[in-house]
Every structure is written in structure tokens, then in C-alpha cells.
Image: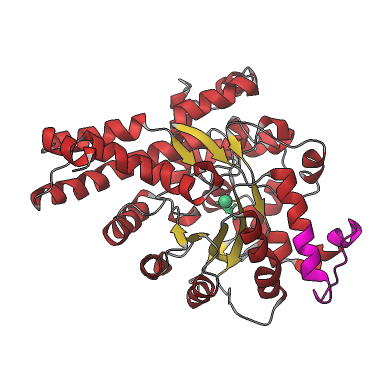
Amino acid sequence: MSSIHSHAEAAPLEGAAILKTVEEVLAATPFIDMHTHTFASSLGALGLWGIDELVTYHYCEAELFRSSEVKPEQYWALSKQEKADLIWKTLFVDHPPVSEATRGVVAVLRAFGLPTQSVDLRAARAFFAAQPIESHIPNVFRLAGISEAVMTNDPLDPAEAPLWKAGGAKHPQFHAVLRLDRILNKWAEHWQALAAQGYEVDERCSGKSTAEVRRFLARWVKRMDPVYMACSLPDTFQFPENSVRAKLLKEAVLPACREFDLPMSLMIGVRYLVNPALRLAGDAVGRADLRALENILREFPENRFLVSVLSRENQHELTVYARKFSNIMLFGCWWFLNNPSIVEEITRERLEMLGTTFIPQHSDARILEQTIYKWRNTRRTMAPILANAYRLLAEDGRPVGRTDIEHDVTRLFRGNFERWTKLGR
Ligand code: RAT
Ligand code: ZN
């Protein structure tokens, strides 16, 4: 008999004690935030934090244009503080901020004991200006209940690459990810950047190109020591197909993942820039053909994949694929899905069909302090879902104890990711 089972028999939880214990365990377990756009402080200005960044988050920018007459081109001409002032007045003062993205800003202010109903941002600006980033980061992680965050690192970003070449970003609380969107999705615009660095590649990705991309990836794996490689993909993504992307995936990226024992993260379903005037806020979502994913999972059994899909309509079939292929780890409720109503539906579905063999959430925080509200929201949504699963299990004859709950929460929010990556080795 396992120790977990004997503990459950020793102290089975009943009724309201189940929810209370789930809440306590969720609060006490430090999570791994396995996909963010935050950065270690050694990567300098890449890391965004503070009130002006929080208020001008692109999720809030998209909402601004629904409540204000301002035109995108007028908005982009403003300074960062002017943008933040306009969004604050429009979304937080003129109307109660009930949307998920705006409510998040309120929760962050409250977490730091700052006023949530001011007519301006003066007090918040003064507070953040006084925080030294080195102590602010661990403070934020503590408030967010995370032990570490996984970054998104683009080797072809002209602002980022030199920082890595100059020594990189070793930091115990941040892990790197080799992000390949420019190479896989925009080869026509970026092959020359590789050529300029001495790699023998061409526009059609012929000849030595794929071998040379592998050499480039090997170089960057050495430099970044990433926990996985990653790419976001359009709703129209197909595999196999006669395209540079499919060729690079098959002949360069997936072999490199195998060589370096790294999972590949596929984030599928973006409709890029449906409204280019909104810039970062201009992307939308489309239902993808997940047969492309099915083909990849079957053709590359030696590769491990982390997969998130953006369309709500794709979630059920994605969960079915995870029952068919053990080389896929589902993760997160991504971007437009990260709202309590949808998170609840998706997470229940996954728990019912996969047990605890998935990663329920990542924060996708772009601004450091967003980790605080995004993880609070995740814990709040997660507690009744898990409690309900345990209540049903107890009704069916297998009561659970605190140790069972600790086991599951750790598996969901740490262990599954550790097992999939080098963090578990
Ligand atoms: O959620 C977001 O902030 C998006 O803009 C994307 O960055 C997305 O998460 C991605 O990683 O591509
Ligand atoms: Zn992201």
C-alpha cells in the first residue's frame, strides 16, 4: 500500500474541508511559470515592470479602443505615460474595470497596498520608482506564489541577441526558451540575418540551409541553455506540407530538439495582425486543423512536445490527442482563453480526460507584476474544480487526504513540467 493511500485512509477529508484544504495547498505550493515574457534583470531593459507598463499591456490597449474615440495612430504618437494616463482614465476611472485584464491591474495595486480608485497614477508611479529591481523580482515572485519563471528568448531579436553574446542571463529564478517564430514563420524576412552571421543559408532554404540552421540552433542552445524550443503558429498551420516551415521543422528544429533532449513547444491558432493598426493588440484567433499536430505526434515519437492551442473550439480534440500520444504535454489556457469562464471549462475537461497529466496554466505575463494577478486568478479558479473532482471521488468510494492533494497540485504545477524538461533531471 502506498504512503499516499494510507494517509488518505488515516485522514479522509469531507465536505467543506476538501475545498479549504485544496485552497491551502494551492496557496502553499510554489508553481513553475512555464511560459512568460518576463526577463531576468541581467537582460536589462527587455524586462517590463511597473504601473505604466501594466496599464498599457496590449490586452488593455485593445479594450481602450472600444471605450474611447482615440484613433490608434493618435494613441501610438503619445508618450508611455500619456498612454497610461489615457487608459487609466478611460478604463479605470470613467467605468468600473470589470474585464479580466483591467481587474488584474486593480489586483496588482491592491497586492502592494496602493490605492485602486485614484483619479491618477501618481501614487503608483512613486511606489514603483522606489523599487530596486533586484529585490522587487523576488518580492513579486513571492506574491505570485511562483518559484521560477520561464522566459521567451529570441535569438534574432536585435535588442536581445547582443545581451546573450555578452554573457547571457544566468539567473536561478529564470529559465531561457529558444523562440523560433522569426525562423519558422518569417524565413523570407530573416534568412539574411543568419547569412550575415556566416551561416550558408538561402531564401529557398535549399542546399546546406537546414544543416546550417541546425548549426545555428546548436550555437544558441549552448549560449542560452534553454529548457525548451518554442514557436507560435497560425490557425492555417499544416504538416506535412511543401513549405520552408515544414522543411525546417522536420530537418533542423526537431532533430536539434532530439540531439539536445529538449521539448518543442507549439502554440497553434493565431491569426496574426487581423488589425495591423493595433500592433501587438492586433492578433486574433482561428480554429486550427489539428490533423497537422496529429501527423507530427505520430511521425516524431522520439520528440517531446508542449502544446497549447488558442481556439476554444480546438480544446476538446486536443485533449483527445493527449490520450492517444504520450509525447504531448498540454499546457495552459492561452491569451484569449485565460478568462475564468473558459479556464474552468477547459480545465474540467482536461482533468476528466487526462487525470493530472497536463500543465493547467502558465501566466504569459509580459509585465513582471502580472504574475501576481494571473496566478491568483488561476488558484481561485482551480480550487473549486479540484475540490469538485475530490468530492466526486469520495462519493464514489475513494476519499482523499491532504497528502493526495499536495501530490496532485505539485504534479500539475511543477512535476509535469520538470519531468518534461531538464529541470527534473
Ligand atoms: O499573450 C500574449 O501576450 C501574446 O501576445 C503572445 O505573446 C503569445 O503569448 C505568444 O507567446 O506568442
Ligand atoms: Zn506568450
Please name the residue shown 70% across and 44% down the image: 224
Percent of width and height locating residue 203? 84, 73
Outermost residue toward the top in this view: 130
Q: Nearer the viewer, residue 51 or 5?
A: 5
**Magenta extent:** 193-215
The furthest residue to the front: 1
The picture places residue 129, in percent across and down from the top left corner, at: 64, 21
Residue positioned most to the bottom: 242
Q: Is residue 8 above or below residue 70?
A: above
Q: Is residue 147 above or below residue 321?
A: above
Q: Nearer the viewer, residue 255 or 288?
A: 255
* Quadrant for the N terminus in the image: top left
Magenta stretch containing residue 363, yes or no? no
19 vs 183, left or right, is left
198 part of magenta stretch = yes
- Measured as percent of width and height from the top left, residue 361 is found at 43, 48
Q: In this view, does 248 lie to the left or right of 4?
A: right
When the figure is inspected, residue 104 is found, relative to residue 226, above or below; the finding is above
Q: Which of the pair 121/144 is nearer the observer?
A: 144
Residue 342 lies, in percent from the top left, at 36, 56
Q: Residue at x 48, y 77 (%)?
A: 291
In percent of the image, x 59 and y 60: which residue is there? 283
- Determine if residue 116 is in view: no
Q: In this view, does 40 lie to the left or right of 305?
A: right
